[in-house]
Amino acid sequence: MVEAAKGRYAQVICCGDVVGYGVDPNRVSEWVRANTALIVRGNHDKFCSGIEPIRNLSPLAAAAAVWTLRNLSPQNKAWLQQLPKGPVDFDEMRILHGSVRDEDEYIFDAEDAREVAGQLGANVLFFGHTHRQGIFYCHRNGIRQGGGPPEKQTELQFEVDDTASWLINAGSVGQPRDEDPRAAYALFDTVSRNLTLCRVAYDIAGAQAKIRAAGLPAKLADRLKLGA
């Protein structure tokens, strides 16, 4: 993903879940620490750094969280514990993990977006949590939902106007849940207001091998090829 986007961005923003399912939590944490202009914490960042009890997770997520907590360096664990809770305002935008009213609330569909549409507080908001790439166009006449690029495309563009609020989910780099196994990210030009939702292939087999070698549940590896 970093190589695919090289030369196309000035700053990196992260909507949380730096760690959680992969087996390179220290390497990823260190890259994010060194390269992001802004980040908010995700629910897995809380579980994997010990802020919240792992008993609240599903068995698969709990197994990954326990492994991550044991393997994080003290420095990266402390950094994760200090990540800010969203939403955070940034350059007339808002950055959050779940929703504006609860960092752990999911926005899966138009009905979910409608529930929070009156509380957004900005024209452009970036969020995560669902691991599903897409946008919600929240207008006074209703909510429109759109997904990322289809299978044979790597990019899908939107012109972000100011007649409504835009809830934008860049998707997940390593754990997509929208049935597209490619890594997902977004590019946003704050001048032209052009949004590009991007997908790029990566070494899924290599990531799967690392998960299996770590002794984590096989399903955590298998699901990478499915994007589910």
Image (cartoon, rainbow, N blue to C red):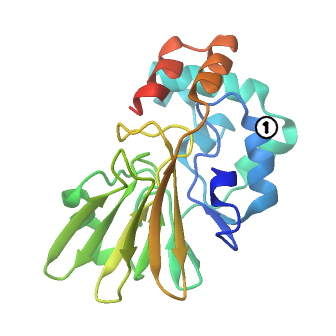
Q: Is residue 89 left or right of residue 79?
A: left
Q: Residue at x 70, y 68 (%)?
A: 7
Residue type at the position of mark 1: Asn
Q: Name the residue rendered at 69%, 15% in the picture.
A: 214
For the point 51% across and 21% down, which residue is it? 220
Percent coordinates x, y for residue 14 in the rendering = 61, 59
**Which x, y percent locates residue 169?**
43, 59
Density class for disc 1 (Cα within 10 Å; few <14, some 14-19, many ≥20) is some
- Tell me if residue 87 can be seen: no
Q: So how many labels did they put on this image?
A: 1
In depth, the one of 38 and 148 nearer the eye is: 148
Q: Which residue is mark 1?
A: 26
- Quadrant holding the C terminus: top left
Residue 20 position within the rendered picture, expressed as x and y whole percent measured from the top left: 60, 35
* Residue 212 visible from this viewpoint: yes
Residue occupying the far front of the picture: 152
Residue located at (46% from left, 51% from top): 171
Q: Is residue 5 left or right of residue 166?
A: right
Q: Is 140 placed above or below 10 here?
A: below
* 228 and 76: which is toward the camera: 228
Q: Secondary structure at mark 1?
A: helix
User: Is residue 6 shown above or below 51?
Assistant: below
Quarter-wise, where is residue 76 in the image? top right
Q: Is residue 91 above or below residue 219?
A: below
Looking at the image, is 89 positioned above or below residue 128?
A: below
Query: To which quarter of the image does residue 215 belong?
Result: top right
